[in-house]
Image (spheres, grey):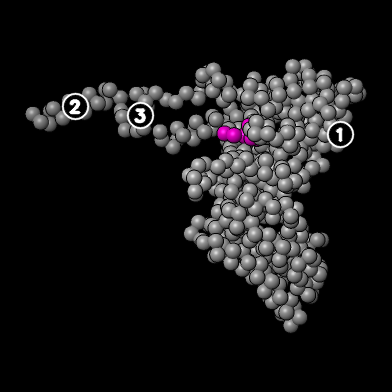
Amino acid sequence: MNMHCFQSIRRTGAVLALAAFAPFVAADGKLVIKAGKVITLAGEPIENGTIVVENGRITAIGTDVQAPWDAEVLEYPGLVAFPGFVEAITNYGMDRSNENVDVAPFLDVRDSIDPVNFYFENSLRAGVTTLNVQHAANCVIGANGHIVKPIGMTVEEMSVKPGAGLVLSAAPKGGKSAATQAQALRGAFGELRDYLEDVVQEKKDGKDYARREALYQGREPDEETSKGRAMEGSAWKVEGLELVPRWEIDEKQAPLLKLVEGKTPAFFYCGSPKDVSVAIEVAEKNGFLARTTLVLDPSCWKAADVIAERGLPVILDSTLVHIETDPVTGEEIETFVPGVFAEKGVRFALRSETALNQSLWFQAARCVGYGLTREQALAAVTTTPAELLGLGTRVGSLAAGKDANVVLFSGDPLSVTSKVEYVVIEGNLVYDRSTDVRMRHVETGEQPENTAPADEAEFDPHPEDKGTGEENGDEEEAEEEESN
């Protein structure tokens, strides 16, 4: 297939995706959703419930609520309304999951997000309405993350919360040992401290290097950064930082300074139990332990006591059961990881493997099968990740004042037979299964119009090299005359 044909098919796919997920805009921002059952996760389920939405927010919810007379009404007595799932952390949806540089907090994930990536489309099909897009674990310190909703043709349209936090990794990056990874983490904050001390001393000496470098980098002061302020934080501090206007702080160091001052969340990857102690040490010595969430490999359940003692929340790997071989008997030992953290009283969020494979509803259902209560499992894919992302007042449950993110299921959200029929995000109907051409193709084999590949027998990659039959005949006659 040549490039022109490939681009044509890709454009056709994008148009079909837009057609399937074209947003429905409620009249004057007013919408009423009526469902046979409403699972709020903020109280008891409501039979024959009504959700009233105005300007993207829920204004009322219950069985006997007054709705605006001029609101659009979506009435589905056979469906179950449910808050959208919240993906606590994912590295999908970007052009690449990591950067080559070890320490890259000066970068922003928003510049790597691809709004037309199929991952977001599939997330919507799975009822995921909020996603924390972050770098993966193959880094020392990653870029600033971005929380999005899976709808929109630009990152601005998708945006829920920019500057969602920095990823750090205690798990060794490719090519590094555990020792060099730990040293790289400690070294990054040591360099920050040295830099701040140097820039303060330059100001005291009357030198203007920091200002000139900031202007060279194209930065300008605004109301927030035009003045200096004393360094905040619960760990180490550099005296005299109030002498340096914040806009003059090097853009490569400013994100780490915000982290040390406790103004930025941290998501710390741990690939083994011993990584947990490194993560806690680095976070505590640099003052951001209180804003740290550990992102754990399944084997890290062995450090659950330490994690519980420090009161840290965790995001678990998509592999829920850790399997290891007993060195004496050779028998396989299985450990249900969420069960360990639930028993220790550690707040945990679940991760999906991908939007299609082991998505959040599936992970929660598996947890119930392994013995967690339904409430614990649902919290791990809705309210708990929402709280960890600083969005507990907006998403994760259905209540007055929260974002109108509502998923309408054909049945129980944790049943394997249930399907996502409709998705409403911030008061807009953004997904309708009945118009999802890709889903119809998978389920029924129906070929969407204008998407069938060209027949290989008819496909000619070089049509310009061929003339008409008459021209070919003339050429053959000329060759015969010349040979005679």
Q: Which residue matches tag 2?
A: 476
Judge whether 188 appears above or below 408 on screen: below
Gap in Å between the C-alphas at discs 1 and 3? 60 Å
Gap in Å between the C-alphas at discs 2 and 3? 22 Å
Position of the N terminus, as image quadrant, is: top left
Position of the C terminus, as image quadrant, is: top left
Part of the protein shown in magenta: 357-363
Taking the magenta stretch, the answer to whether it contains residue 324 is no
Q: Residues within 10 Å of mark 1 (few under 14, many from 20)?
A: some
Q: Residues within 10 Å of mark 3 (few under 14, many from 20)?
A: some
The numbered dot on residue 460 is 3
Q: Residue at x 55, y 48 (%)?
A: 96
Q: Check disc 1 and give the amino acid type.
A: Ala
Q: Which residue matches tag 1?
A: 400
Q: Residue at x 78, y 65 (%)?
A: 234
Mark sitting earlier along the chain (2/3): 3
Give the structural element (helix, strand or loop) at label 3. loop
Q: Position of residue 385 (x, y in %)?
A: 72, 43
Observer-nearest of 152 and 342: 342
